[in-house]
Image (spheres, rainbow, N blue to C red):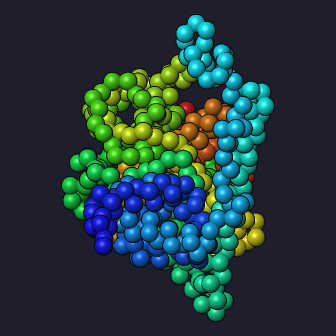
């Protein structure tokens, strides 16, 4: 006769807690899915959640929910079909290996009546250190394996579309650009599988991050530069030769920025906390440098304005003792969360390496596909109908602002090198005169390099300018 405990909610909850403890290791969750040949989408459909939720579970987070019970039961069944081998099982240091010694006789108080303090033997310390090194090597090997697999995923996608298009490169490129958003989100989820930080994909948003309407501009000022040196004007007979330069993969480089991980919380004005990131209401200092664009972009209005983390950090740096180019901004209030600068770094490095290989091979199809992935990743992080996996308009604003801040830093570097900055536009356009810019940057298409802009016919964009009337 049944005791009735099977239908008891307490018994069911205890069973779920036991399963959660059995599959506490995110790496084991990933292993079981891969061993069964299942995709994130297949697991998501079976459990009744979104693809990104499964990716979050595999990254380490697994909050209690009805769907979690289904997911745990799936893992339990997969573990029976694909048990871990001895090599896959995580080694543990047994108590007998620790070599604990006590200060007195046996385990108990010492002669002075105080509890004896365990002392780790040299052999135990050596064993523990070896175990830690082994774990580090295993994690590094696992991360490298993931990178290899994801590079193969990119190659397979290109090959697949080329086959479908019968070798037509233009048709294959168009198809790859069309699928760029789901593909890059898949790559992002995989790079997060062994990540240290868990993030919130759909945090509650403060009103400042919501557009008043589709036709109204964003309330966050991204500091986009649109600057031309007031002392020079373009002239066909000018005495100054100007070269227009192009920054390579500006948004890809900008993925390395301080991003808030969780829900943004409000704080009053005061000191800037460098361990957090978000958006800030500030009153910036007046910019009076005649030969450099304002780090606030082309904003002409005075008074308080909402800016992003990269803009604020740039202003604070320029106000510091090393530069003293502007007064420090006044921070009135902030919406921030704990942050890290390396959150998207695995994705950035993966796409950067694949891009470098494609450029080296003259593979324009793959290069265009990768550009579509990182650019669309940024542009759809807001409330976009094209990307249902993440809604992080704060990330979108921060990454864009980081690209603009990076361009400003390049303009500043050129000025320090003795070059004349004639113009700085958007994320990637810098016009210089007065010397050889190649002494400042290497020429090429790699990240960190610069190249001369070309027109539609492939000709270098150069022109002449003259000093404005009354100014030299």
Vertical order, 439 against 74 (above or below): above
**Horizontal placement of 463 versus 219: left or right?**
right
Tell me if I can see residue 8 in this picture: yes
Residue at image location 51% in from the left, 35% down from the top: 292
Of 357 and 26, nearer the camera is 26
In the figure, residue 129 lies in which quadrant? top right
Tell me if I can see residue 404 in this picture: no
Looking at the rendering, in which quadrant would you find the N terminus? bottom left
Of 125 and 318, nearer the camera is 125
Vertical order, 53 against 209 (above or below): below
Image coordinates of residue 95 in percent, x first then y, are 66, 38
Image coordinates of residue 434 in percent, x first then y, are 66, 40
Please identify the residue farthest to the left as the structure is shown.
212
Residue at image location 70% in from the left, 68% down from the top: 358
Image coordinates of residue 289 in percent, x first then y, are 47, 29
Of 177 and 115, nearer the camera is 115
Looking at the rendering, in which quadrant would you find the C terminus? top right
Residue at image location 38% in from the left, 63% down from the top: 68
């Amino acid at each position: 006769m049944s005791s009735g405990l099977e239908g008891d909610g307490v018994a069911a909850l205890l069973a779920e807690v036991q399963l959660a403890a059995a599959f506490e290791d995110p790496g084991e969750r990933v292993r079981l899915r891969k061993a069964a040949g299942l995709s994130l989408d297949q697991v998501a459909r079976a459990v009744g959640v979104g693809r990104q939720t499964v990716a979050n579970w595999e990254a380490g987070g697994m909050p209690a929910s009805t769907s979690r019970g289904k997911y745990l039961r799936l893992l339990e069944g997969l573990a029976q079909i694909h048990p871990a081998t001895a090599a896959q099982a995580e080694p543990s240091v047994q108590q007998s290996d620790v070599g604990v010694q006590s200060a007195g006789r046996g385990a108990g108080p010492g002669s002075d009546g105080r509890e004896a303090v365990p002392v780790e033997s040299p052999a135990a310390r050596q064993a523990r250190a070896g175990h830690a090194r082994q774990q580090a090597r295993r994690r590094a090997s696992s991360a490298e394996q993931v990178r290899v697999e994801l590079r193969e995923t990119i190659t397979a996608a290109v090959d697949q579309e080329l086959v479908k298009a019968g070798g037509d490169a233009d048709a294959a490129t168009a198809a790859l650009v069309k699928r760029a958003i789901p593909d890059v989100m898949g790559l992002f989820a995989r790079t997060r599988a062994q990540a240290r930080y868990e993030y919130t994909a759909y945090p509650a948003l403060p009103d400042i991050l919501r557009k008043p309407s589709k036709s109204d501009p964003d309330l966050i000022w991204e500091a986009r530069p649109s600057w031309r040196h007031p002392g020079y004007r373009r002239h066909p007979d000018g005495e100054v030769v100007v070269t227009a330069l192009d920054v390579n993969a500006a948004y890809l480089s900008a993925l390395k920025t301080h991003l808030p991980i969780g829900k943004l919380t409000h704080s009053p004005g005061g000191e800037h906390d460098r361990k957090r990131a978000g958006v800030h209401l500030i009153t910036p200092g007046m910019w009076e440098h005649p030969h450099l664009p304002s780090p606030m972009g082309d904003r002409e209005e005075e008074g308080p304005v909402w800016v992003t983390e990269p803009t604020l950090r740039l202003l604070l740096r320029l106000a510091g003792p090393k530069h003293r180019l502007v007064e420090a901004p006044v921070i009135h209030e902030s919406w921030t969360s704990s942050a890290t600068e390396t959150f998207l770094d695995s994705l950035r490095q993966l796409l950067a390496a694949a891009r470098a290989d494609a450029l080296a091979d003259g593979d324009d199809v793959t290069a265009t596909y990768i550009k579509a992935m990182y650019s669309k990743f940024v542009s759809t992080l807001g409330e976009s109908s094209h990307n249902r996996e993440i809604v992080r308009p704060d990330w979108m604003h921060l990454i864009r602002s980081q690209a603009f801040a990076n361009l400003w830093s390049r303009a500043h570097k050129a000025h320090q090198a003795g070059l004349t900055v004639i113009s700085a536009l958007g994320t990637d356009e810098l016009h210089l005169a007065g010397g050889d810019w190649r002494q400042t940057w290497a020429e090429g298409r790699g990240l960190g390099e610069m190249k001369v802009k070309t027109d539609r016919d492939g000709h270098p964009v150069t022109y002449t300018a003259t000093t404005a009337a009354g100014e030299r």
